Image (spheres, grey):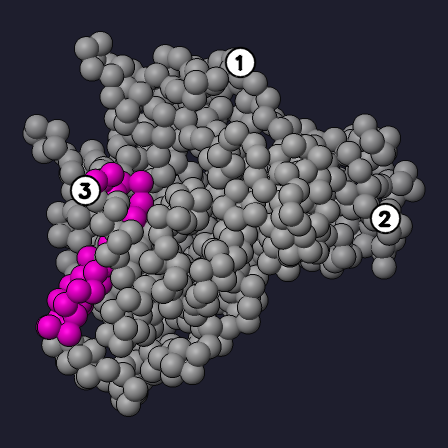
Amino acid sequence: MNLEQFLQKKRGDPAFMASVTHWERVEPKPARFSDFSARLAEPLKRALNRRGIYQLYSHQRQALDAVFAGKHLTVVTPTASGKSLCYTLPSLQAMLEDKAARALFIFPTKALAADQVAELNAFIGLLDEAGDGIKAFTYDGDTAVNARNAVRAAGNIVVTNPDMLHAAILPGHLNWVKLFENLKFVVIDELHVYRGVFGSNMANVIRRLRRLCAFYGSNPQFICCSATIANPGELAAQIIGEKTALIDENGAPSGEKNLVFYNPPVVNRQLGIRESSLSHARRLAGELLQNGIHSITFARSRLNVEVLTTYLKRLVADVLGNSDAVRGYRGGYLPNLRREIERGLRSGEVRAVVSTNALELGIDIGQLEACVLCGYPGSVASTWQQAGRAGRRHGSSATFLVASSAPLDQYIVNHPEYFLDQSPEHASINPGNLFVLLNHLKCAAYELPFAQGELFGDAPATGEMLRYLEEENILHLSGGRYHWMADDFPSAEVSLRSAFDENFLIIDISDPAHHEVIGEMDRYTVPMLLHERAIYLHNAQQYQVESLDFDDKKAYIRKVDVDYYTDADLTVNLRVLDVFRTRGALSLGEVLVTSIVSVFKKMKFDTHENLGFGEVNLPELEMHSSAMWLTVEEGVFAGLGREEAGDAMLGLSYALGTIAPLYLMCATWDIRVSFHVRDSFTKKPTLYITDGIPGGIGLADKAFEMMEVLLGHAAETIEGCPCEEGCPSCLGSPYGKDGKKNALLLAKRLSNELS
């Protein structure tokens, strides 16, 4: 059965269509072409002809014209629209004109870098003798030590990732003199990934790069490529420190797309409880698999990826238990395993893959026709990016968005027009975050002494921070320059992607004679998935965690065969450290967020029954961030009993957690909304909206400014929900006969107080 037949069958299935809230069909679009630029070198035109390309897409031609005019550039077009030619052609042209010219291509993952080098070398091979001597190499953690000197000396195009640039290339710039002296282009692909703490770090890495380029006498052009976000030009300017020309009109063709909004049936209308989104996503993915339609299923957690992979592998397992036609894919898998899965997808041997957002990026994963989203990915941009992994070669495609009972999912699935009309979210970063800035200032000082009065990028606090580092005996002022004098290597202590340094290694000790590292995990996730007695799922194999060495950052696991998995509960607390601003009942300030996992539960496969609990004994994690809080005066609760008032505020805070990510234009995990019945700082009922990024990236500030708007829209969400007494879609839980009415009353009273 092909995809069109499958979709026709689904349209004719009354049981399926009863759960479909909207079926959006996006018409195919033809390509818009432009002729080659007269300035494009003849060898490049001949190479393009050999690939069957006789004209460029309109956005590719616009990109070339902007680069030839000497402008920094940001290209924003969908997946598989030929963005790579926008930077490959000008880079190769520079090298055809000057054999000493260099380019630096930066991709957020090693998989993307490996993809790009293979594509680059294939294209260079089409240049005949004109391309002789032009070399493209990957430089990352997997590059063999004996090959690194060759890359430094002969690599015209060095393809790397931010982590390697930060930890190896910049600190070791004396070994990269040819690169820095002759650098013509810096390419930053997948720009939209650089948000939050990762983006804030990346902006400072680029400050360090530009500082070294200036020292060596080069001034490279920057070419940034991004999936669709609301503020690509603004983000690019924050990352590279200069404005860019923006090209966002796509000239590439696209096939027919079907986007199906699917809401599992209600099983208890009074409580607002729906059937499991996991079960329905599993059923859909299974039907696609059994009908020979190659698909990708996205789940929002590592645990759900492994649970879904286990289910789907059962469908295709042969008598010997082989089930490699279905694979899981997520962070934590070792690089060799990820490359194996990617090859299987490209060759067609893997017919179904279940992934976290790790496959959201533009890795070539072959011809997939359908995409199943198990829950709303958290942002408009991510949803379109994940949907774009199907139909990448311009054929027809289908995406099924299977909603969970979470309020944000329910809002989207019941208001598809909001999703379809809404512009993608803004990407927020804060390069001036003092925690981030200080770390990179130390790295920059190690790389090259700072002159008195010199600014680090446009950071006005540079002088003050340099003096602080001098007082701490980290820098030494001599001859008007600040020199590094500490013993340690500063970049080794800075993680670009999270607030926590060093991943934990996961070691399989099933065979006493051979212990094997099978994965890794970040420090924040470890307490939830790798605590002692946890069932850890890896590529559908079950393991039990025998011991967790928190100090040595190692987890020791052993293969088991049980009919349950584990899920831990995270307890989060916060304490106000400083108040920055107040406005009536609203305040903005610095907070200390502490989190600890103290208990886990055992969940049975298939039925998801709770089989019991267990204790977890692990240290508490701490994070400094920013938050805004709303202090609620007693008068707001007039006419309500103590229990009614507490329930109403809990329900309202849940509704705000639904609305805030939409209006602050961030992902759901970027903020935390909580309510304290009697807060230790204000001594009154208090509602907090906390920035989920260490140091904060301005989300709490935005909430502080627009709290009246958030309360107004929370009231609309509660009032518009069809439930009777409050449900997981509006209040998170039913709070009795008047729970919904009371939450709505408080939302309106608080909104009136602030307006």
User: What amino acid is at disc 3?
Assistant: Glu
Residue occupying the far right of the picture = 635
**Residue 223 counted in the magenta span:** no
Of residue 384 and residue 266, the one placed in the foreground of this image is 384
Q: Which residue is denoted by mark 1 in the rendering?
A: 617
The answer to whether 639 appears left or right of 411 in the picture is right
Q: Which residue is denoted by mark 2 in the rendering?
A: 582
Q: Which residue is denoted by mark 3 in the rendering?
A: 340
Task: Give the quarter of the figure containing the C terminus.
Answer: bottom right
Task: Give the quarter of the figure containing the N terminus.
Answer: bottom left
Front: mark 1 or 3: 3
Up/down of 692 relative to 543, above or below:
below
The tally of labels here is: 3
Residue occupying the far front of the picture = 479
Of residue 330 and residue 26, the one placed in the foreground of this image is 330
Check disc 3: other Cα within 10 Å, few if <14, some if 14-19, many if 20+: few
Which of marks 3 and 1 precedes in the sequence? 3
- Residue 687: image location, x then y, percent: 76, 40
| Cβ–Cβ under 8 Å for marks 1 and 2 | no
User: What amino acid is at disc 1?
Assistant: Asn
Figure quadrant of residue 168: top left
Distance CA(mark 3)–CA(mark 2): 55 Å
Figure quadrant of residue 594: top right
- Residue 178: image location, x then y, percent: 33, 58
Disc 1 element: loop
The answer to whether 480 appears left or right of 523 in the picture is right
Query: Which residues are drawn in magenta?
Result: 118-146
